[in-house]
Image (spheres, coloured by chain):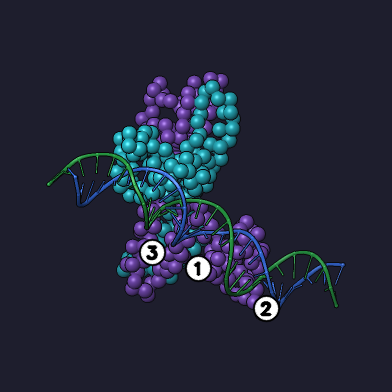
Chain colours: A cyan, B purple, C green, D blue
DNA sequence: ATAAACCTTGGATGTTAGTCCAAGGTCAAG
DNA sequence: CTTGACCTTGGACTAACATCCAAGGTTTAT
């Protein structure tokens, strides 16, 4: 069992943030001490980890709330509704992955172009790097390769 | 050349948003008409596309400003500084990709578990799906597989 | 030549996601 | 038995990112 300050400290967030998440239904501590202190379990810790990770990849707290409230239950015949939500999020995740792979290629090109060798590179920006079709690079016409 | 409303419409944002990006140095239209109307070029369009895509994967406008102002210039001896920025962003992108791959696996499990077959699944949440080690699944002990 | 549909600026307002503060209760250490 | 570091609540405040509004200028279509 962790008190709010401990948990906050472990994840480098403020206690206020945890209270804020509670107020918005994202993370309710599993127990309270006799004196009313919030007590968080390992499970709560995992939920917090999930919230913070989902945030870094661009999900809003509303999105995260939706993800957390997905309950696939064999006796729940709203199952089809759940599948619609899950599949929508899955598509969103896949779009994000595709974007990030694209960014990754471009940043790699920039990194290589930058101080990449004795001659260094021609002028280049991330937009030029993104524009170059990674699947069809023609080195001699390319702005961003070393030398 | 696009006027602000056209460009806004193409990208499903408000004209106000484009003026906001301009005020914050993210997207300055390349020209103005004689009467003072903003005129955006194809290049500006690409910049806007970049801004919006970067936003969906969790970059702040400040991050995006930083990415856009990267200029790898062969005559610029601040090259090492640029490489530091680029490599930091690259790491960030790679972390995001790793998170998203993890989410993707979990959402796939949920999607499969949900209405996945005649028997459907045991109760399952995204947290349980995330927790299950995808590289070491033991179907009989797993909460979220069909039947 | 005038209405409809654009555009300009500046400033007010709204939403999301925290962050801070005040007044007071709890708890462990000395 | 008090000092210091925690915790409680409620409410005010902030920053980032827009979004709206007012007063007025421009363009195009009839």
Residue A23 in the image, given as x and y percentages of width and height: 46, 43
Whole-percent x, y for residue A117 in the image:
32, 65
Whole-Å distance between the Cαs marked 3 and 2?
A: 42 Å
Q: Do the CB atoms of the residues marked 3 and 1 lie less than 8 Å apart?
A: no
**Residue lying at 35% horizontally and 59% vertically, measured from the top left:** B87
Would you call the spot at circle 3 few (<14 residues within 10 Å), some (14-19), or many (20 or more)?
many
- Against B13, residue B117 (above or below) is above
In the displayed structure image, the side of residue C11 where residue A4 appears, left or right: left
Tag shown at residue B24: 1
The reply to whether dot 1 and dot 2 touch (C-beta < 8 Å) is no
Q: Quadrant of the C terminus of chain A?
A: bottom left
Write down the residue under mark 2: B35
Q: Are marks 3 and 2 in contact (CB under 8 Å)?
A: no
Task: Give the SS element for disc 2.
Answer: loop
Question: Residue under circle 3?
Answer: A113
Residue A53, percent from left and from top: 41, 45
Image quadrant where residue B127 sits: top left
Task: Out of B96 and A128, give the one closest to the viewer.
Answer: B96
Please state which of residues A49 and A18 is positioned toward the viewer in this rendering. A18
Which of the two labelled residues, at mark 1 and mark 2, occupies the earlier sequence position?
1
Residue D25 in the image: state x and y as whole percent: 70, 78
Looking at the image, residue A26 lies above or below residue A126: above
Q: Chain of mark 3?
A: A
Q: Which mark is residue A47?
A: none
Give me the residue at 49% from left, 41% from top.
A65
Q: Nearer the viewer, mark 3 or mark 2?
A: 2
């Amino acid at each position: 069992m962790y008190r709010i300050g401990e948990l906050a400290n472990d994840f480098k967030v403020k206690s206020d943030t945890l209270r804020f998440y509670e107020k918005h239904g994202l993370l309710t501590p599993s127990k309270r001490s006799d004196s009313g202190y919030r007590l968080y379990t390992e499970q709560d810790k995992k939920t917090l980890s999930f919230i913070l990770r989902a945030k870094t990849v661009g999900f809003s707290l509303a999105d995260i709330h939706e993800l957390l409230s997905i309950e696939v239950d064999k006796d729940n015949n709203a199952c089809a509704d759940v599948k619609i939500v899950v599949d929508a999020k899955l598509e969103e995740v896949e779009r994000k992955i595709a974007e990030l792979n694209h960014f990754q290629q471009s940043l790699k090109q920039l990194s290589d172009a930058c101080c990449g060798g004795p001659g260094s590179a021609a002028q280049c920006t991330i937009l030029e790097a993104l524009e170059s079709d990674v699947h069809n690079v023609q080195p001699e016409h390319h702005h961003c390769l070393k030398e």
